[in-house]
Amino acid sequence: MADDSFHAFVKELFAGMGPVQIKRMFGGAGVYADGLMFGLLAEGAVHIKANDEAMKAALRAEGSGPFVWIPQNGPRKGEQVDLGYWRLPEAALDDPDEAVKWGRKALALAKAKAAAKKPKAPRAKRAKR
């Protein structure tokens, strides 16, 4: 499936969540709602944020697995890096209501992670000389 048609399919799949944006990045794309990335499009598959054990267990029970990135160069070359995204269950690809259910769970995880981040301390202003 060409990127544009795949992106349109994903937007339609998650339309029940409200406006969804897709932003290209590296070799794939991020799926965003409410300004937060909750999905990842890579290797022709839809992945959703699964950075807690309960979500991973639920996805595992549906036959899903993690997206693992293997850098081709740099200090982590050849290392298997778990980015915290798991493949959307197959059944959800044919059922927008099911996809939205999973998408909302993934978005809730993204919101919780964003809320847990410490706000950056304001930079001290330099005195003018």
Image: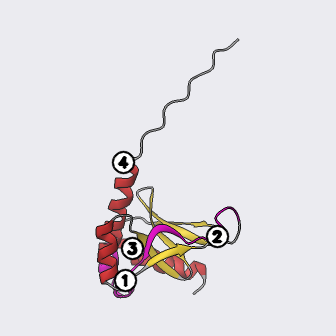
Is there CB contact under 8 Å for labels 2 and 4?
Answer: no
Q: Residue at x 39, y 59 (%)?
A: 110
User: Which of the two marks, 3 or 1, is nearer to us in this view?
Assistant: 1
Mark 4 sits on what residue? 115
- In the rendered image, residue 67, in percent from the top left (x then y), is placed at 49, 75
Q: Which residues are magenta?
A: 74-100
Secondary element under disc 4, as helix, strand or loop, is: helix
Name which of mark 2 and mark 4 comes first in the sequence: 2
Mark 2, Cα crowd under 10 Å, few <14 / some 14-19 / many 20+, is few
Name which of mark 2 and mark 1 comes first in the sequence: 2
Mark 3, Cα crowd under 10 Å, few <14 / some 14-19 / many 20+, is many
Magenta run includes residue 90: yes
In the picture, measured across the screen, residue 121 lies left or right of residue 88, that is: right
User: Which of the two marks, 2 or 1, is nearer to us in this view?
Assistant: 2
Image mark for residue 89 = 1
**Quadrant assignment, res 49:** bottom left
Name which of mark 4 and mark 1 comes first in the sequence: 1
What's the residue type where badge 1 is placed?
Pro
Mark 4 vs mark 1, CA separation in Å: 27 Å
Q: Residue at x 30, y 82 (%)?
A: 61
Name which of mark 3 and mark 1 comes first in the sequence: 3
Image mark for residue 14 = 3
- In the rendered image, residue 4, in percent from the top left (x then y), is placed at 58, 78
Q: Quadrant of the C terminus?
A: top right
What's the residue type where badge 4 is placed?
Ala
Q: Residue at x 49, y 70 (%)?
A: 40
Mark 2 vs mark 4, CA separation in Å: 29 Å
What's the residue type where badge 2 is placed?
Pro
